[in-house]
Image (tube, rainbow, N blue to C red):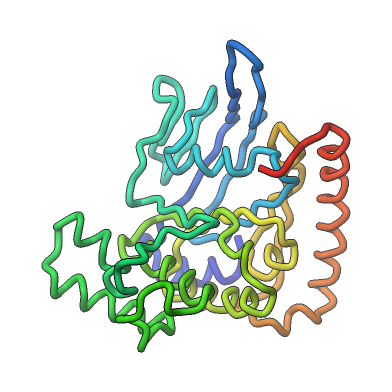
Amino acid sequence: MSAVLQQAGKAEKGVLKGAIRIEDVVKIYDPDGAAVMAVDHCSLDIPAGEICMIVGPSGCGKTTLLNAIAGFHSITSGSIYLDDELLCGPGKPMAQPGSDRIVVFQNGALFPWKSNLDNVAFGLMMQGKLGKKEIYDKARSMMADAGLSGTEHNFPGEVSSGLRRRVEIVRALMNEPKVLLFDEPYRALDSLTKSVMHEALLEIYYKNKVTIFFITHDLEEAIFLGHRLVIMTSRPCKPKKIIDVDIPHPRDYSVLTSTRYRQLMDETVELVHEEAKKAFSAGEKEG
């Protein structure tokens, strides 16, 4: 476990939650027909509070694994646990979606007809467990912590794509989830906006210490954000190698010029390139 997680564990002993354990998971689509294996006996332990970056060729099965954790897809065999409680496994092929696992999608999911503040408050308002004033006070406070003061009454279409992404993350955190599941959330952003969003995400993470399962094709992003990189094989998906990103937290973009960063990048590029060639030879397509 990284130093920052050890330090957090000492400061908040017994508080950190969100440990994910994936045990020998297999996912086969259309088992009685084409029998396409998307995930092949995949096992992975993600400690509570870790930023775990998942990289691998397009179509290898990364999103299938994320969807199984979220409760959007069933698994064929194996088990997935959250804090030692079974999400899915023998006798329960599909996890129940819940507010303890929130997905931040590629294309965004804000309501364009609601203000940013109303978007952030929406989930808790629908649950009806807190009063309106308490919910909106919490929403304003969390937006301020995320650098969104002054945008509360704007609509999503009136702010930049980077700010919209930040609003989505704050909305997800309003439910105090154990796990955030990111499916290439910054893929459509330009490189400058993406770099700002990376630092913003880390700032939010340092305040919340939520477990993050983050799929990306961007190796610079993976190394800059992650405590660990899980490099997946071409389809069917399983870990090829797990790399500890032993660059101290907190981080800023100065780490990109460090010797260790370049070493990690060289190692990761070589491993991912090997799997990308296999995927290309097999005719895999984006997805």
In this rendering, position of residue 98 left or right of residue 223: left
Q: Residue furthest left?
A: 131
Q: 23 or 147: which is nearer to us?
A: 147
Q: 55 or 21: which is nearer to us?
A: 55
Residue at 33% across, 51% down: 99
In this rendering, position of residue 145 left or right of residue 21: left
- Tell me the quarter of the picture where residue 217 sits: bottom right
- Tell me the quarter of the picture where residue 25 sits: top right
Residue at 26% across, 63% down: 122
Q: Residue furthest top?
A: 32
In this rendering, position of residue 139 left or right of residue 240: left
Residue at 60% across, 30% down: 24
Give the quarter of the figure containing the C terminus.
top right
The percent coordinates of residue 246 (x first, y second) are 71, 68
Classify 60 as above or below 48. Answer: above
Classify 283 as above or below 150. Answer: above
- Tell me the quarter of the picture where residue 177 sits: bottom left
The percent coordinates of residue 283 (x first, y second) are 82, 34
Q: 248 or 134: which is nearer to us?
A: 134
In this rendering, position of residue 269 left or right of residue 153: right
